[in-house]
Image (cartoon, rainbow, N blue to C red):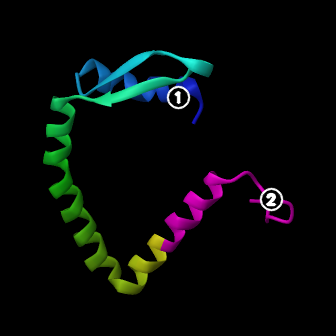
Amino acid sequence: MDRSTLKRNLAPLEAEGLLSLGDEGWRRSRTLAISAKGRARLEQAFPLWREAQKRLRRQLGEEGWDDVRRGVDRVLRSVERPPQRGDRKP
């Protein structure tokens, strides 16, 4: 994710007091810290997220759920490394 997109996505969270951004450091890096308010919001959200996953899993069935997880794993692996020679083009 490029810097401007990341900043644009984090700005509302910072404005709401859910996190804080540190000063710019080495190579324009910045620290990010979750606030107590942000941690409390996460604790509220986790049970809702788990329930949403359970409902989706029931709707898809185990095989469909496994397909989704494999697909997400492929996406994550593809963004973790640069394209390799011989990779299929989209």
From the image, which quarter does the N terminus lie in?
Answer: top right
Residue 42 is situated, as x and y percent measured from the top left of the image, at 20, 43
The residue that label 1 is drawn on is: 5
Q: Assign a secondary structure to mark 2.
A: loop
Q: Nearer the viewer, residue 67 or 30?
A: 30
Q: Is residue 39 above or below residue 35?
A: below
Q: Position of residue 27 (x, y in %)?
A: 62, 21
Residue at x 13%, y 46% (from the top left corner): 44
Question: Spatial distance from mark 1 to mark 2, Cα to Cα?
Answer: 26 Å
Mark 2 nearby-residue class (10 Å; few <14, some 14–19, many ≥20): few
* Residue 71, image x, y percentages: 53, 69
Q: Residue furthest front?
A: 26
Residue at 28% across / 18% down in the picture?
Answer: 15
- Which secondary structure lies at badge 1? helix
Quadrant housing residue 8: top left
Q: Amino acid at mark 1?
A: Thr
Residue 6 as seen in the image, left or right of residue 33: right
In which quadrant of the rendered view does residue 74 lie?
bottom right
Place of residue 87 in the rendered image (x, y in percent of width and height, measured from the top left): 80, 64
Give the label on residue 58, or none. Answer: none
Image height check: is 75 above or below 9?
below
Q: Where are the magenta residues, as a range?
A: 70-90
Q: Is residue 81 left or right of residue 8?
A: right
Residue under pointer 2: 84
